[in-house]
């Protein structure tokens, strides 16, 4: 039988133990909740820090992307400029090459084409009587595929020779088939039917006047280009035979055309030799 006093002590001890246990449980619960709250807070803080770092990393990545995009943009512009410069250089090089080829071709043609002019002239006796002969020569390296010559005969004042050559009419041309290079001068007889009276008049010197013949040589080279060379000769008489101071056909000091490139001539009334 338990005594009341002893029972009270036991009850009080149990109650104290229960209270202690409940207190410890309460403290543990509070500590646990505090730990959970702290852990949760730490996790949220870490998450926030991590998110902030992610944001910073994203921002840094965006900055790097913008920087690389800028560099890529300027690199592209530079590449386009270089490509454009290279294309322009190539185009210019092709143009210069074509010009050089064209210049070389023109130079080669100029060096090798025909150059025809009147070397001299003289009054001569021919099988048809008096003849006015023009000596043509080709000093070039290739033949003149075809050439034509036309002239006029006039009586002019001695001091007016140069002025009389200023106007060049359209001559009626006489044609030949070819004139080769490196050959002796070719004697070409001019048509004199329209100048018989002048020729006869200068059978002896006429005071203050001279006998003047001037004309044009038109020829086509082997490259298909046409050229014209003018000529002019004068003398005091038209006497034939031995050349003297009176009948010698001289060149005037007037400037006349030589080897001038022209368009293909169109003749209305050409004649053949």
Image (spheres, rainbow, N blue to C red):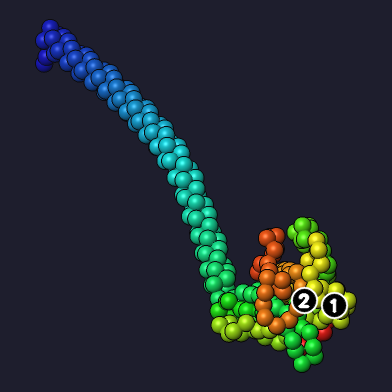
Query: Seen in the image, is 150 located left or right of residue 224?
Result: right
Is residue 224 in view from this perspective? no
SS for dot 2: loop
Q: What is the crowding at mark 1: few (fewer than 14 residues within 10 Å), some, or many (at least 20)?
A: few
Q: Is residue 240 above or below residue 163?
A: below
Residue at horizontal 58 percent and vertical 85 percent from the top: 183
Residue at horizontal 35 percent and vertical 30 percent from the top: 53
SS for dot 1: helix
Q: Is residue 164 above or below residue 116?
A: above
- Could you tell me which quadrant the N terminus lies in? top left
Picture coordinates of residue 190 (x, y %)?
78, 81
Residue placed most toward the observer, 199 or 173: 199
Q: Are marks 2 and 1 in contact (CB under 8 Å)?
A: yes
Q: Label 2, on which residue? A: 238
Q: Label 1, on which residue? A: 200
Query: Seen in the image, is 178 located left or right of residue 272?
Result: left
Q: Counting residues from the N terminus, which is met first, the one under dot 2 or under dot 1?
A: 1
């Amino acid at each position: 039988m338990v005594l009341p006093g002893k029972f009270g002590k036991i009850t009080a001890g149990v109650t104290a133990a229960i209270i202690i246990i409940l207190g410890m449980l309460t403290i543990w619960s509070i500590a646990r909740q505090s730990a959970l709250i702290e852990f949760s807070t730490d996790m949220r803080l870490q998450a926030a820090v991590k998110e902030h770092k992610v944001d910073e990393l994203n921002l840094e990545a965006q900055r790097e992307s913008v920087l690389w995009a800028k560099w890529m943009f300027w690199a592209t512009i530079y590449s386009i400029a270089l490509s454009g410069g290279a294309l322009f250089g190539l185009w210019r090089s092709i143009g210069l090459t074509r010009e050089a080829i064209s210049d070389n071709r023109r130079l080669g043609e100029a060096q090798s084409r025909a150059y025809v002019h009147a070397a001299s002239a003289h009054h001569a006796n021919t099988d048809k009587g008096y003849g006015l002969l023009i000596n043509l020569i080709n000093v070039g390296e290739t033949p003149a595929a075809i050439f034509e010559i036309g002239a006029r005969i006039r009586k002019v004042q001695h001091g007016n020779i140069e002025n009389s050559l200023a106007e060049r009419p359209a001559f009626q041309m006489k044609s030949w088939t070819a004139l080769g290079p490196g050959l002796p001068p070719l004697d070409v007889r001019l048509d004199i039917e329209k100048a018989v009276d002048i020729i006869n008049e200068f059978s002896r010197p006429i005071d203050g006047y001279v006998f003047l013949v001037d004309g044009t040589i038109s020829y086509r080279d082997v490259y298909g280009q046409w050229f014209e060379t003018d000529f002019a000769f004068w003398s005091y008489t038209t006497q034939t035979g031995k050349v003297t101071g009176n009948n010698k056909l001289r060149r005037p000091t007037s400037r006349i055309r030589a080897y001038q490139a022209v368009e293909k001539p169109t003749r209305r009334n050409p004649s053949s030799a």
